[in-house]
Amino acid sequence: MGAPGSDPRADKNPAEDAPRRTLTLTLNPEFEHGFVVDTGALLIKGQRVAADEMLFIEPGTEELTIEAIGATRLILLGGAPFGEKITMWWNFIGRTHEDIVEARAAWNAQADSFEAVTAPAGASGADIVTGGALAAGQGATADHPRFGGVVLLPGEYDEKPRTSVIPAPELPNARLKLRGD
């Protein structure tokens, strides 16, 4: 099974002879970009990017040809590079390894306090969020001091509905490095 929200019926690891589709993208050369693959796979600059992986493209690329292998679903992220060096790990961004350690501990301590939002029959994701905890103004509070409220959507594709957020995994057995070092 892939990331939460991904279709467990989709092919996470298509065969080399799976159907392919090529697409050429025009990118802002001042931006950095990340290609996150949910299902299928990509070939970018000769490098295969499998499901649940991300490929980072540094600024300077104006045009990029990607090849999708199989039924591929991806997310393209992009934007101006940060003006300072940062440390990134899981869902956390900080200036140091210690910032990430602290954020992980705070997330896991707060995770049990989030409540699931039950979706009305036939509601879309937007309806759930609009009528859920975040729309009611539950930002950072004494109950949710750092991360604000989290809306837990019901399961997709016949999955059992989630009743808690995903805890941050264990940190690697190494010191996290600043991005760019």
Image: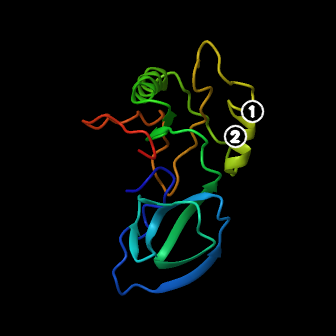
Side (left or right) of 78 relative to 165: right
- Residue identifier under label 2: 129
Instruction: Quarter of the image for the C terminus: give it.
Output: top left
Farthest residue, direction left:
173
Q: Residues within 10 Å of mark 2 (few under 14, many from 20)?
A: some
Q: How many marks?
A: 2
In the image, residue 89 sits, relative to residue 37, either above or below, namely: above
Q: Quadrant of residue 108?
A: top left
Residue plotted at (69% across, 51% down): 124
Farthest residue, direction top:
142
Which circle marks residue 2 in the picture? none
Residue plotted at (44% across, 29% down): 96
- Badge 1 marks a residue whose secondary structure is loop
Return the x and y of residue 68 as percentages of the image width and height: 49, 77
Instruction: Quarter of the image for the N terminus: give it.
Output: bottom left
Return the x and y of residue 50 as percentages of the image width and height: 39, 66
Q: Amino acid at mark 1?
A: Ala
Residue plotted at (59% across, 17% down): 145
Seen from the viewer's position, the closer of residues 138 and 26 is 26
Q: Quadrant of residue 55?
A: bottom left
Q: Amino acid at mark 2?
A: Val
Q: Residues within 10 Å of mark 1 (few under 14, many from 20)?
A: few
Seen from the viewer's position, the closer of residues 128 and 23 is 23
Return the x and y of residue 166 as percentages of the image width and height: 44, 37
The reply to whether discs 2 and 1 touch (Cβ–Cβ < 8 Å) is: yes
Which circle marks residue 135 in the picture? 1
If you read the primary sequence from the N terminus, does the residue marked by circle 2 or circle 1 appear first?
2
- Badge 2 marks a residue whose secondary structure is helix
Q: Quadrant of residue 65?
A: bottom right
Seen from the viewer's position, the closer of residues 5 and 65 is 65
Side (left or right) of 116 relative to 136: left
Q: CA distance from mark 2 to mark 1?
A: 6 Å
